[in-house]
Image (tube, rainbow, N blue to C red):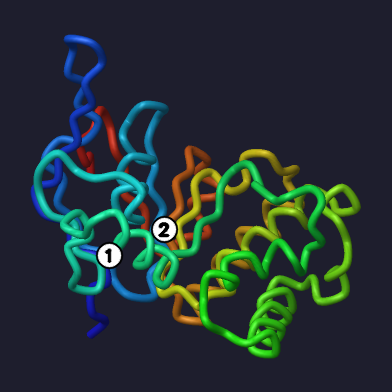
Amino acid sequence: MTENIVTIRSLSKIYQQGEINVTALNNISVDIRSGEFLTLMGPSGSGKSTLLHIIAGVDRPTSGECRVQGIDVARLNESQLADWRNQNVGFVFQTFNLIPVLTAYENVELPLLLTRLSRKQRRHQVNTALDLVGLGDRTHHLPRQLSGGQEQRVAIARALVTSPSLVVADEPTGNLDSHSAQEVLGILQTLSKTAGKTVIMVTHDPKAAAFGSRSIHLEKGELTN
């Protein structure tokens, strides 16, 4: 039986806007299995990105518990949390967030510069990640020399280069045409099915969600299924 990589219990997140409290998440409890490709669905403002950010250690809950690989990430201090994210989480966003003056290779290498790996070890991991997303022949290309789909694949390679156990993606196909979106979703699916990565993706598109192994729906900060 596959173990849970994420365990969430009675999780709530409340933002304060002036004198008004806005509830983004209300008493959420959910388990996510290791190697699962989970999609978070719901309308804008439903809390799906907030939930993703808490799981990834980017945001903290107001109350409740979010354990990832047994660690309650909300209890880590900022320095511990930064180290934990760099070692355990790969991020893929709707905007590719590539640095324009760096090549594909250099963009992918960036997270490794925070590690103690040698240049030779970094080179091996960067080339492996770029090969995995089908861009081994684009290592010296700048972002402006790549298509949108290729840029997002570079971003996925950058997310994978530290060998994280968890890959989080927030509307990763939002800026892509249909063909490029299918390619990117296929890569995320393969990461889950063959590489054993746990992938959690926010999307509002049912066609994108179909690539996942399971979907959960949020509405006004609550699970609806």
Instruction: Name the residue type under label 1.
Output: Ile
Residue at the spot 49% in from the left edge and 63% down from the top edge: 90
Q: Earlier in the sequence, mark 2 or mark 1?
A: 1
For label 1, the SS is: strand
Considering the image in quadrants, where does the C terminus appear?
top left
Compare residues 185 and 59 and report the one nearer the observer. 59
Please, is residue 6 above or below residue 43 in the view? below
Judged from this view, the residue extending furthest toward the top is: 19
Q: Is residue 156 above or below residue 101?
A: below
Q: Nearer the viewer, residue 200 or 161?
A: 161
Does 76 appear above or below 207?
below
Task: Work out whether residue 224 or residue 76 is closer to the camera in this orientation and state it.
Answer: 76
Query: In the rendering, which numbered label is found on residue 117?
Result: none
Q: Position of residue 217 (x, y in %)?
A: 31, 42
Whole-percent x, y for residue 18 in the image: 23, 11
**Residue at 34% of width from left, 67% of height from top?**
84
Tag 2: amino acid: Ile
Quadrant in the rendering for residue 85: bottom left
Could you give the CA–CA distance between mark 2 and mark 1, rounded to whole angstroms?
A: 9 Å
Q: Confirm or deny contact between disc 2 and disc 1 (CB under 8 A).
A: yes
Percent x, y of residue 80: 29, 64
The residue under label 2 is 200
Q: Which residue bears the numbered disc 1?
A: 32
